[in-house]
Image: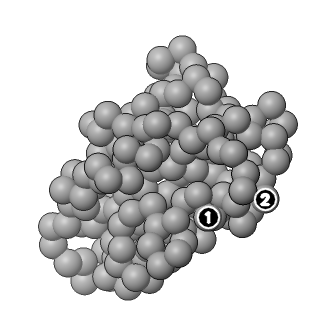
Amino acid sequence: MHNYLMKKPFWHSCSLMLAGILFLSCTSLSSGSDRRRISDESSSAEPYILESINRIRKEHHLPTLTVSPALQKIARDHSRLMAKSGYLGHGHSGNDFKTRIEKARLKGWREVGENVGRSMGYPNNSATIISGWMQSKHHRENILSAGFNMTGIGTALADDGTLYATQVFMGSDDRQ
């Protein structure tokens, strides 16, 4: 078994998911303009989240995160699974974060972390998710960790219009 240096905030955030903050459902979306907005949101959510998180890091005098295709795949696959199952969390049914990292066979990393969230019914669900992360101590710690230099962001829309987002963080000397 590999010896992992997992950030303490990650393990604590598993049990401290702030579903009330991160899952903020309001009204169902049914008009044609709402459907177009949802479609537009799904295609623009990942770059929006990346730009927003990097802007927040710059405001705190931290370097921006570089996107890793391997981390992007992990994040997208997890968001798709959450959207399909309606589950919000770091893993279930034998697909927890540690298992997903092991299966990806990532090399050269010192630490990893993950934030997940979901939102529905807001003008900008991505912004709502980021706001929830910044209000949560452990999610905020991941975003503002100087130890992380790489990221992958994945989003997926559930059939009901809920946006699911996963951001995987990694500290590595080898920019995969």
Q: Residue at x 28, y 66 (%)?
A: 120
Q: Amino acid at mark 1?
A: Thr
Q: Give the image location of residue 171, x and y in percent.
A: 68, 35
- The vertical placement of 167 against 94, above or below, is above
Q: Quadrant of the N terminus?
A: bottom right
Q: Amino acid at mark 2?
A: Arg
| Quadrant in which residue 163 is drawn | bottom left
- The vertical placement of 142 against 97, above or below, is above
Q: Nearer the viewer, residue 43 or 169?
A: 169
Residue at the disc numbered 2 = 105
- The vertical placement of 103 against 137, above or below, is below
Q: Nearer the viewer, residue 99 or 40?
A: 99
Q: Residue at x 37, y 37 (%)?
A: 138
The answer to whether residue 46 is seen in the rendering is no
Residue furthest toward the front? 1
* Comes first in the chain, label 2 or label 1: 1
- Count of numbered circles in the view: 2
Q: Nearer the viewer, residue 27 or 67?
A: 67
Residue at the disc numbered 1 = 99
Q: Give the image location of residue 52, x and y in percent.
A: 48, 38
Tell me the distance, in whole angstroms, between the alpha carbons under discs 2 and 1. Answer: 10 Å
| Quadrant in which residue 153 is drawn | bottom right
Q: Give the image location of residue 34, x and y in percent.
A: 31, 74
